[in-house]
Amino acid sequence: MWTQYAHRRIKIKTKVTKSVLLEKFLASTGVSTDTRKISPGVIFFALQGPNFNANAMAQQAIELGACLAVIDDPAYQIEGKTHLVPDSLLALQELATEYRKTLNIPVIGLTGSNGKTTTKELIFSVLSQQFHCFATSGNLNNHIGVPLSILSIQATHEIAVIEMGANKQGDIRELVNIAQPSHGLITNIGKAHLEGFGGIEGVVKGKGELFDFMKATEGIIFLPKDPNIVHEMSSKRGITKYLVANEALPTVLIEAKPIISFRCANGTIVESHLPGIYNFENIQMALAIGKYFGLSDEKCLEGIRSYVPNNHRSQFIKIGSNQVLMDAYNANPSSMSAAISHFAETENTPKIIILGDMFELGDASAEEHASLGQLIASYPFEKVLLVGQHMQHALVHLPKALFFPDKFGLHTWLQDHPIQNSYLLIKGSRGIKLESVLPFLNH
């Protein structure tokens, strides 16, 4: 495995280094890559960034209580306190891989274009009704977050749920080799990170790397209830070890406007805290996994009832006299279209949408934002407020929409034009951080 920095190209060390680090890790209290989060006895990994040399923080990490600092620059060695490797990131990944081999528990790996984090949290909520379950914290789902997650699994954990994200082909392959999931699922395939994947076919191939791993290792996969592209991906690989959602605990949707409620085969009615029919598939998947691991129907359903979304994902918030559906954690054409369509079908009025740019769409950005504008134009929203340079492409279909090149212009407009007694959808890519508008809605 190789890594590329501007100043060098290096290869990870031998198994001797891996075994030494594993031994030191097993005697430590954990790992950290952030000197602001050092606790006594942890191993600090100095990870290089484009604009900083984390090796320079090794001394501070030791002073704060780290038992060891893993560095890749000999200029920062401290006798007896540092462990020099060719590359700190690769050392972290290799350590996680070696540690994973010592864990004799089921590890559920999941990826997908939309709904990864919500599905992960639903699965965690269900499985936690019976097991001491570990799940990825937040969205630590990349080449750094996955190894940190694996290294956070403790001896007392009985099962783990690891979220894996990808920006390009090859990312999932790298992450499954670290996490080595025994069970896997792909939530869906959509138009996300098109710039890195090179189009929708690249997304299919990239996400499919999880199924490639499951096929090679004879793992179990979980499939959505309704036949779709994920089923096709499984079938093309000849995967025979799978479970289809909604078979072990059948459910029927009652309502999803605004909150999902559903009925079980025995007549039990469950009300969730999640909006949108698109989240019903995520609920069904969590129920299927709960049943697969031996939970009773009631424990599975309690896991759904007790899950409350947070961190600006499908979250209802009361702001002054306004009701806000806050879904500003991320956005791509697939998730944006689903959220807008669901929002438009709810009975609450007046409806106002505040939408920010969708990032990482590459050459497809103008076309996708224009298509989004066409979708918005098909609904009778009271107001449409668009934020960000990419969103200007939606204006061709929305002559009455209000456009702001940045969110600070939107803040000013909201101060001058208070919104009251309204139902709002706020959604945009993480980089634009549209949750900043919430204080300006408190009138």
Image: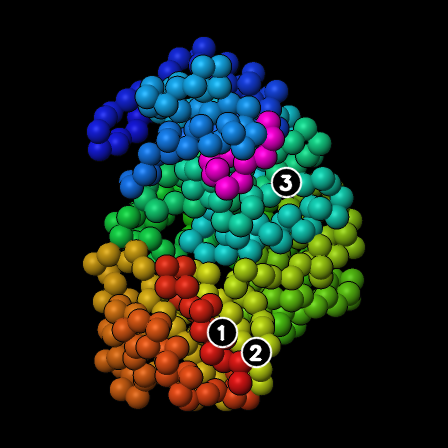
Q: Which residue is mark 1?
A: 438
Q: Tell me which amino acid carries mark 1.
A: Leu
Residue at left offset 43%, top offset 46%: 165
Secondary structure beneath label 1: helix
Percent position of residue 215, x then y? 47, 32
Horizontally, is 306 left or right of 283 in the view? right
Residue nearest the viewer, comparing 319 with 183: 319
| Rendered image: mark on residue 319 | 2
Q: Magenta stretch: dominant SS?
A: loop
Residue at left offset 71%, top offset 46%: 128
Instruction: Report the span colored magenta.
Output: 32-41
Q: Residues within 10 Å of mark 2 (few under 14, many from 20)?
A: some
Horizontally, is 371 left or right of 263 in the view? left
Percent position of residue 334, x then y? 40, 63
Q: Is residue 363 above or below residue 138?
A: below
Residue nearest the viewer, comparing 82 with 396: 82
Residue at left offset 61%, top offset 20%: 27
Q: CA distance from mark 1 to mark 3?
A: 32 Å
Q: Quadrant of the N terminus?
A: top left
Percent position of residue 169, x then y? 32, 41
> In this view of the protein, can residue 131 be seen by the observer?
yes
Q: Tell me which amino acid carries mark 2.
A: Ile
Percent position of residue 150, x then y? 54, 33
| Rendered image: mark on residue 134 | 3
Horizontally, is 294 left or right of 388 in the view? right
Q: Residues within 10 Å of mark 3 (few under 14, many from 20)?
A: many
